[in-house]
Each structure stands twice: as structure tokens, then as C-alpha cells.
Amino acid sequence: MDFQWYPGHMTKAKRMMQENMKLIDIMIELVDARIPLSSRNPDIDQLAANKSRLILLNKTDMADERVTAQWEEYFKEKGFYVARTNARSGKGVKGTQAIVMDACKEKLERDRKRGIKNRPIRAMIAGIPNVGKSTFINSLVGKACTKTGNKPGVTKGKQWIKLNKNIELLDTPGILWPKFEDQQVGLRLALIGSIRDEILNQDEMAIELIEYLKNHYQGILADRYQVDENEDKVKILEQIALNRNCKMKGNELDYEKASKIVLEEFRNGKLGKISLETPEEGTKEA
Ligand code: GDP
């Protein structure tokens, strides 16, 4: 995580969001497509009640396309507008402007009936740390627009970035806290590298990842590490340590090194496009 959340930080972030809500028509919420529920802020639905809502499933380049499609349906059924983006490459980013207009069509119609013309839609981006908010804003806005020096927590005059003649974007994204009291959520955030590694035990994390992969992505571990997926998760980690020659002095197996390899290869995409949550499981857990 970029920084620790203390009750004071949360109160401040929440107050700022409440202030910003008065100014905007639409909330653009970024989540990580690999863990769309675990990477959501628990209070955002309440904070953004009565606003048009757009969820961006970001980092689609890392996620399982089939599962991302399920998530798209899931959120649409709940009444959200949804788009898939890769903020790093820019894929899908510009296209979100048309979706914003669509999501705000009722407001535009109301304006038209009241004789209000040319009032731009005002939008803000929000999400938990590391989902790609800054990258997305940079990709959407391009280099032409310079950023202002406003820092989160500082309520200076709001700066609006004009995306086109119809849409203005609040220049600073809303940084919100994750559901950190939920251990499964913490584990998934740690697996994708959103929480600093020191917080969780590497072996524990690698073993959980191995269990998930063996149950949901048959063949991946066998192909990459030549292990027997019918074995138990700890045994599989042992096989990985053996096959990757992870040894300590005295020829003892180095589980921590093997764990680091698995985690790192998962995060760099070497194991393929993998999602760690499906709507089905997510709904069950909730
Ligand atoms: P923020 O904390 O939400 O503002 O997140 P950042 O914009 O700083 O992004 C966090 C990390 O995710 C950076 O290393 C970005 O390069 C990376 N990132 C952002 N969007 C994407 C994406 O769509 N795909 C991939 N692979 N990486 C991304």
C-alpha cells in the first residue's frame, strides 16, 4: 500500500470525498480486474449514492479475459456502467469518455428540458491505492495538461481538467482504503503486489496462490515448474524448490526463495493471465 491507513486518514479521505460528491455528476471507480471485489472500497456505494456510476476494470492485460467478462456482466446487473481498461497501454482509455456521456444521459436530458445548454459533465476518479488511477488519468488526459500541486488531504481550490467540450475531470483522484479487516481481501491484495510484502509471510502467500492455481488454472503449475498438481500445496512448493534448485547452505531446501519465485512470476505475468476472484465465489463470500 502507498501508505498506512489510520482512522485519521480515513476520516479525512471520507470528508474530502463527501465534499467532492457535491461537485460531480459521475463517479468513475477504478478496480483491479484480477480482484474486482477485493480492490473496492467498502464505503464507496454509500459515498457515491445518487451519482451516475462507472466501474473501470483496469489492468485487464493481467486478468483472465473470460473471468473479466463475467465481472462486466456482474456489475452491469447491479446497475453500473462498466468498461475494461489497460491504463498502461491506453487500451480502452479514451473510449471511457463516450461511456461517461451515456451514463449521464438522463442528467443531460434534464438539463436540456430546463433549457440548460453546454453544461459539462463533471467526473471524478476514485479507488484504493495501486489500482492505476494516476496512470489512467495520465493516459486519458495526455501530456498537454499539466497537473496542479494539490495533494490529497489539502482542500485547495478544485482543479478541473477539460477532457473535451462535454466532460471535466477533477484533477486529483480520490484515494480510498480497502476492506483491510477482511483477511481474504488482504491476501489477494498482497498477491497482486498491492500491499508491501513484509506484512505477510511469503511462504504462506505462495502456498495460497499454489492452491488457487491448482484448483482454478489446471496445468499452469505443471507446465511452468514440472510439478505434480495432484500433490498437496506444500508438497508442490517443495517440488518447485527442488526443480528451481532453491537450496540453502547444507543443501536444505529454501522454501522462501521458491515462494519468491512463484509470487514474482505470477506478478510479472509469467504464469499467464490470471484472475483471483470470480463473481460466483465473490458473491458466496459476501
Ligand atoms: P494509483 O495508486 O491508483 O494511482 O496507481 P498507479 O497509477 O500509480 O499504478 C500503480 C501501478 O500499476 C504502476 O506500476 C502502474 O504502471 C501499474 N498499472 C496501472 N495501470 C495498469 C494496467 O492497466 N496494466 C498494468 N499491467 N499495469 C498497470
Image: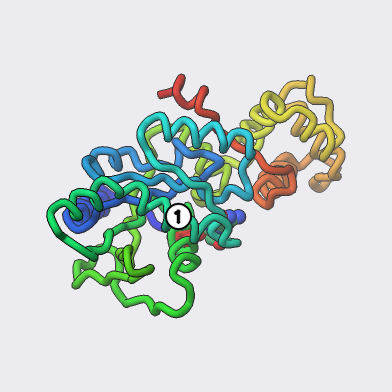
Who is closer to the viewer here, 167 or 219? 167
Residue 110: x %, y % from top left: 19, 49
Residue 76, relative to residue 165: is it above or below?
Answer: above
Name the quadrant containing residue 218.
top right
Percent across and percent down for residue 51 are 25, 45
Secondary structure under tag 1 reads: helix
Q: Residue at x 50, y 37 (%)?
A: 72
Residue denoted by label 1: 96
- Residue 106 appears in which quarter of the rendering? top left
Q: Is residue 11 visible?
A: no
Residue at 32% from the left image edge and 77% from the top image edge: 148
Residue 14 visible to the viewer? yes
Could you say where residue 212 lies in the image, as x and y percent from the top left?
Answer: 64, 29
Q: How many marks?
A: 1
Left or right: where does residue 178 sit relative to residue 112? Answer: right
Q: Where is residue 131 in the image (x, y as percent from the top left)?
A: 47, 52
Nearest the viewer among 181 and 116 is 116
Identify the image quadrant of the C terminus.
top left
Which residue is at a point 29% across and 39% down the rendered structure image? Answer: 45
Please state if 200 lies on the left or on the right of 211 as rendered: left
Kindly identify the residue that appears in the image at 69 percent across and 42 percent down: 259
What's under tag 1, amino acid-wise?
Thr
Q: How crowded is mark 1: few (under 14 residues within 10 Å), some or many (20 or more)?
A: some
Residue 219 in which image quadrant: top right
